[in-house]
Image (cartoon, rainbow, N blue to C red):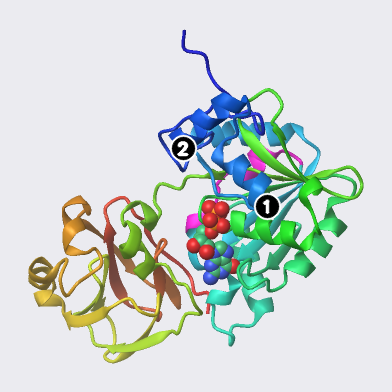
Amino acid sequence: QNEEIRCIGCGAVIQTENPDELGYTPNSALEKGKESGEIYCQRCFRLRHYNEIMPVSLTDDDFLALLNQIRDANALIVYLVDVFDFNGSLIPGLHRFVGDNPIMLVGNKADLLPNSLRRSKLKDWIRQRSNEAGIRPIDVELVSAKTNESVDDLLTNINKYRKDRDVYVVGVTNVGKSTLINQIIRQNTGIQELITTSRFPGTTLDKITIDLDDGHELVDTPGIIHKEQMAHYLKGKDLKVVQPQKQIKPKVYQLNPEQTLFFGGVARFDYIHGDKKHGFTVYVENNLFIHRTKLENADNFYDKHFGELLTPPSKESIDDFPELERFEFKTERKSDLVFEGLGWITVPENVTVAGWAPKGANVLLRRAMI
Ligand code: GDP
């Protein structure tokens, strides 16, 4: 008989296959747990012993089921997005899933954007783009979970807006939800007893709750997997090279029509039509190699240098890397050509450009952020 083993912390079904998914426990820990009769998943184990939570992801379907449960709750929804990958962090139809519960939108990773970008301007931009996506937050906040910038203010505002309600923190994977919750846990005391793990009513989905002073809870929900993220096409070292760690230093390229920029081997930008010598400002990880060439030579150049000069991906992983797919746009105003998860290029009005990204990853045009 194949009886399901469940984590005594969160109730998730224990599995030993996939570290990123719910209920993961290394085999060795599972054996030990069987002896003692106390089996915790790795996530709950680390929470208990190191006061630290780890990210966990769900499939879209599971996530939607979870959101449906949030609809029935009476809660403030803290919806975390990555300001560097704003479009990749959007959860379309969020309101439908959270019902009448108010949404507070929190832009994380503010430390990556230039200091010259006024925070109030960025908040306005975030609010406008959210409204266009059908999301109407009652408040927009900006933080850096990593540097702790404005996390205090965030907690103050959460307390102000939650008014006698629980708080649910939601977001897609990789927006920094675990990092933020860990900051909150750290700020919230000398703690162990404040953190409890408990089962989400009626399901096996785990949640991590932090008790608030009035008997309510702050609940960390698992992140939704966003399939179009660059993270799914690059592994380990290669991924590090494209994910910004420090503040982005914008780079300006003066381009003529029929010129191309390669971003390692992961993306390509063509300036097709428009005036001579236009400035294009690039916002990508500072160490990502950028190579300028003529549009007419670009295809050949890519074939010849992919995985070598044009890296990442590195030589060993080029076989698993999807072909680049081309998206063409004509601008009517100053815009960002966005390579989801990789960054963006600010392009002037009245030009025709093309963005290329690995098949499956998204390229889009949006109102310029900066
Ligand atoms: P989760 O999947 O939403 O739980 O995301 P994580 O907390 O695991 O963070 C994903 C990645 O983003 C990690 O590499 C973090 O170090 C990084 N990260 C999280 N918060 C910040 C932040 O405020 N600034 C920067 N620069 N990086 C962050």
Mark 1 vs 2, N-terminal side: 2
Q: Position of residue 9 (x, y in %)?
A: 67, 33
Q: Position of residue 6 (x, y in %)?
A: 59, 25
Q: Which residue is at a point 63% across and 73% down the rendered structure image?
A: 147
* 21 within the magenta span: no
Q: Is residue 286 left or right of residue 263?
A: right
Quadrant of the picture in which ligand 1 is shown: bottom right
Q: Is residue 203 left or right of residue 139?
A: left
CA distance separating discs 1 and 2: 19 Å
Q: Which residue is at a point 40% across and 54% down the rendered structure image?
A: 229
Q: Which residues are magenta?
A: 88-100
Q: Is residue 258 above or below residue 135?
A: below
Q: Nearer the viewer, residue 74 or 52?
A: 52
Numbered circle sitting on residue 51? 1
Give the residue pinned by disc 2: 26
Q: Which residue is at a point 27% across and 52% down the rendered structure image?
A: 359
- Kind of residue at badge 1: Asn
**Mark 2, residues whose alpha carbon is within 10 Å: few (<14), some, or many (≥20)?**
some
